[in-house]
Structure formats: structure tokens, C-alpha cells
Amino acid sequence: MARICVITAGHLATCPRMLKAADTLAAAGHSVRLVSTRHVDWAVAADADVRQRRPGAWKGALGAAAEAGRRAGVPFALDLEDFHSAEQDGGTAAAALGHGLAERIETNVLPDAQLLTTSSGAIAAAYANKYGVHPVTVHNTFPLPSLAPALEPSSGEGLRLYWFSQTIGSGRGLETAVRAVGLAGVAGELHLRGRPVPGYLESLRSLADRAAPRLRVLHHAPAPPDSMVEVCAGYDVGLAVEPGSSVNNRLALSNKVFTYVLAGLAVIITDTPGQRGLAADLGEGAEPCAPGDEAMMAEALAAGPRTRPPWLAPGPPPGARPGGAGTGSIPTIAAPW
């Protein structure tokens, strides 16, 4: 078996793709060393939880990401989670500089990589069109839970909506969701998990007071990556409402969707090129909405606060098809139960 070093520019707890890669390679019998950064106070404790759950699974080596591959004289692979040369919003000088630097780096390193992976078919196609490379699509999924999710509606009045990310802030579609709840005229709770940008929760709650007075906005602290499906359970609807504000955002396939599905939630998902295929795979378990379309989202929310989508019943979801966007996770979700 090989000796493999997995390097990430973030914390263990905030880069689940590389954590899953290390787990998978170690489970296959390889000797794995995982190198990460250590610079955000709240993530340090989460890193400790990650390591405690994997005693001896792989060798942790926290520190700055190192230059690898060429200088070491060994083969290297790259995970392209985003389309980095079109990742930022707008046409500002700062965005142009960032995109130019990303393109320069990608042009230099991608051809020499032994393996490239990415997080969505749309991003893979974008890299193929721009650089002539062919990344393998590996979705941001988590393992199937050992027990089937509880499919009963949550307790209490109204809908319980759920959304999570490392950072809670503007430009993620949350304002559209709040206005949609107000247009739908339904009572409910919007649960947000992550680290809020200073002042953002107050701003969102102020919007809810004006536009959706029957909606409560509740905040939860970040959770370790191994517990994301567990903490997602107990809600009614998961929100994957990326606004498509940049090329990369339109091409991305949110890891939120896969997590919601494993926890038994219905999904409201924006109809972007990156998410369209998975929305079709989920059939009646997902309600696609145009990015920023409050009226369309409101119609979905008003359709029935206690309606559970038919695909959550035993058996594969309607529309699940071999080779589709959910291959390896969505079409087989009901099988273990």
C-alpha cells in the first residue's frame, strides 16, 4: 500500500472533503498523513473531536499547508471543489485580480496532476472546457446513517426550516427564503447553524420582523463534520437556496442537499446548472425554485406545512436513475433500511 499525504488549507473540521478522502484512503489500507491549518479558535475544539473519533485511523500533522508534489518528486492529485477562476461575485478589480491569479495557478499545476476531482458535474465540465482536463466528480456526501430517518413532521406549530454553513451571511439566499415565508403566510422557524458575520443575524431578524412576522430566526453553533446528519434531523425542510451570484455558485452542487436527504428532510433547491440534475433525481422530494424567486419559493412553502414528500416512503425516490447526479447516494438511500 502507498504512503499518502492529504493537504488542506483549512481546519480538519471545516474541510470535510479532505477529511473523507483521508478516511477512505486509510480504510483501503494506505498509510495516510493529513496536514491542515490551525488558525480559527472555534474550530480547534472541533478538530479535537475529529481526531478523537479516529484513533489511529490516520496520522494528523496540523500546521501550514506545505508545498508538495513537484518539489518532493512524487505524484500528486488535486481536489477542485470550486471553479476558482470564476469564484467571486461581481466585476470588481479585486475579483478580476483573484480570478487572474487562480487561472495562472491552475494553468501551471493542473496538467501535471495525476488525478483531479471536483464536487459537481457542472464544475467538471467547466474545467474540461477551459483547460482540457477531466476531473472525476465526487459529491459532498456523508455515509448513510445506520438507522432510517424519522419521517414524521416535526413537533410544534408551523414549518421548521434548516440551513447550515461555516459562515452565516448575505449572498446565500437566506433573505429570499425569509421573504418567501412572509409571502406564503405560514408560521415557522428558520434554524441557522454556523458562525454569523457580525451584525448579520440582527439584520436578518429585522427583515423577518418586517416581511415575515410569523417567522422566528434561531441560531445554532457549528457542529463537528461527523455529526452533520445527526444535527440536521428533526426539521421539516432543508434549504439549498444558493442565489447563483457568481459563475462558480451557479455550477456548484451544495453539500447541504445530500445532508438534508440523509436526515429525512424535504428540500427546497434553487434551479441552477449545478443543482438541476440532483433536483430531478429527488423527484417529489425536492422543490426547485428559480434563484431569487420569492413567489415561487412561497408557493412551495404554502403547499402544505405538514406534507411529507412521497419519495421519503420506503423504496427508491421517484426519478432516481443510475448514473444520475445522485449516483452512489441518492438512488440507494432507502436500501439499507
Image (spheres, rainbow, N blue to C red):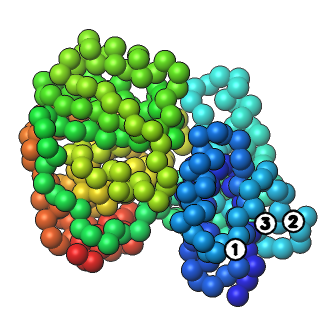
Among the 4 quarters of the image, the one containing residue 312:
bottom left
Task: Report the disc number at residue 32.
Answer: 1
Q: Which residue is mark 3?
A: 112
Tell me if residue 113 comes above or below residue 192 in the rendering: below
Task: Report the disc number at residue 170.
Answer: none
Tell me if residue 104 comes above or below residue 177 in the rendering: below
First along the sequence among labels 2 and 1 = 1
Task: Report the disc number at residue 70.
Answer: 2
Q: Residue at x 24, y 57 (%)?
A: 264
Among the 4 quarters of the image, the one containing residue 145:
bottom left
Looking at the rendered structure, the secondary structure element under dot 2 is: loop
Point out residue 69 in the picture as x, y percentages from the top left corner: 82, 66
Point out residue 135 in the picture as x, y percentages from the top left corner: 60, 64
Quadrant (top left/top right/bottom left/bottom right) for the C terminus: bottom left
For the residues carrying marks 2 and 3, which lies nearer the camera in this image? 2
Among the 4 quarters of the image, the one containing residue 1:
bottom right
Q: Amino acid at mark 3?
A: Asp
Q: Is residue 230 left or right of residue 308?
A: right
First along the sequence among labels 2 and 3 = 2
Q: For the residues labelled 2 and 3, say whether their Cβ atoms are less than 8 Å apart.
A: yes
Q: Mark 2 and mark 3: span between their CA atoms? A: 9 Å
Q: How many marks?
A: 3
Looking at the rendered structure, the secondary structure element under dot 3 is: helix
Q: For the residues labelled 2 and 1, say whether their Cβ atoms are less than 8 Å apart.
A: no
Point out residue 11 in the picture as x, y percentages from the top left corner: 64, 50
- Looking at the image, can residue 158 be seen? yes
First along the sequence among labels 1 and 3 = 1
